[in-house]
Amino acid sequence: MIKKFSTYCVLLSVISLSSLTATAMNTDPVDDEKKKNTLMEIHDRYHQVKLCLTSTSVYMQFDTSVRDLINQELEHKHQKDAQHFIDSEGQFLLGNITYLESDKIEYQTDEIRDVAFENGKLKFTYDSDKEFKFEDIIGTDGKPALENFYLEDLELFYLTYKKYNP
């Protein structure tokens, strides 16, 4: 009797855990829709940054460590620049620092004038000035994130972009 009871308890626990796991794996419907529209997705060699092409946009998603490094660099640059922009009364003439607040930057394809693949590098031309560009994202190795992708992946991304955005 006790053996049957313990068997039922174990079985019930396994069912409960698998149900919890399935519930925890549910994703946001917006992200699911974006995944359905994904035409191309590539990852850098460190798996910290991914570049994605959807039917309507291009986005770069990165680890929090990458975003933190970028924000540290922005703060360091601001402090360095501030030394040169002090008025006669010792007041700073620079504005506030603009931090990268998200782990993702995204532009609609109609905001991107052109994408080129030259000398092994992917280059974006935007229709207007952007606060943060894909080229501004740096990896934790200090190099521009776009340089940390495999050349074959960058070329395939370019060809796929051109196929859907002639």
Image (tube, grey):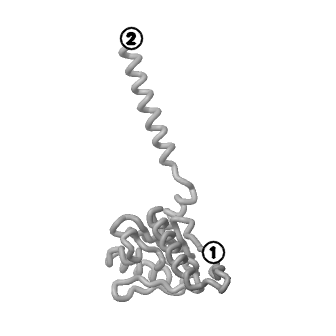
Q: Position of residue 110 (x, y in %)?
A: 58, 81
Q: Position of residue 50 (x, y in %)?
A: 43, 68
Q: Would you place residue 141 above or below residue 162 in this image?
A: above
Q: Residue at x 40, y 65 (%)?
A: 48
**Res 10 visible:** yes
Which of the pair 63/118 is nearer the observer?
A: 63
Label 1 sits on a secondary structure element that is loop
Residue 1 circle label: 2
Q: Would you place residue 155 above or below residue 6 in this image?
A: below
Q: Residue at x 54, y 72 (%)?
A: 106
Q: Residue at x 52, y 74 (%)?
A: 74
Label 2 sits on a secondary structure element that is loop
* Neighbour tally class for label 1: few under 14, some 14-19, many 20 plus, Cα within 10 Å: few
**Res 110 visible:** no
Instruction: Report how many numbered discs are placed on residues in the image.
Output: 2
Which-is-in-front pick, marks 2 and 1? 1
Which corner quadrant of the image does residue 122 belong to? Answer: bottom left
Residue reaching furthest to the front? 89
Which of the pair 5/163 is nearer the observer?
A: 5
Q: Residue at x 54, y 61 (%)?
A: 33
Q: Which residue is mark 1?
A: 96
For the N terminus, which image quadrant? top left
Instruction: Give the distance between the C-alpha atoms of the residues marked 2 and 1, in whole angstroms.
Output: 72 Å
- Going from the N terminus, do you reach mark 2 or mark 1 first? 2
* Neighbour tally class for label 2: few under 14, some 14-19, many 20 plus, Cα within 10 Å: few
Residue 66 circle label: none
Amino acid tagged 1: Asn
Amino acid tagged 2: Met
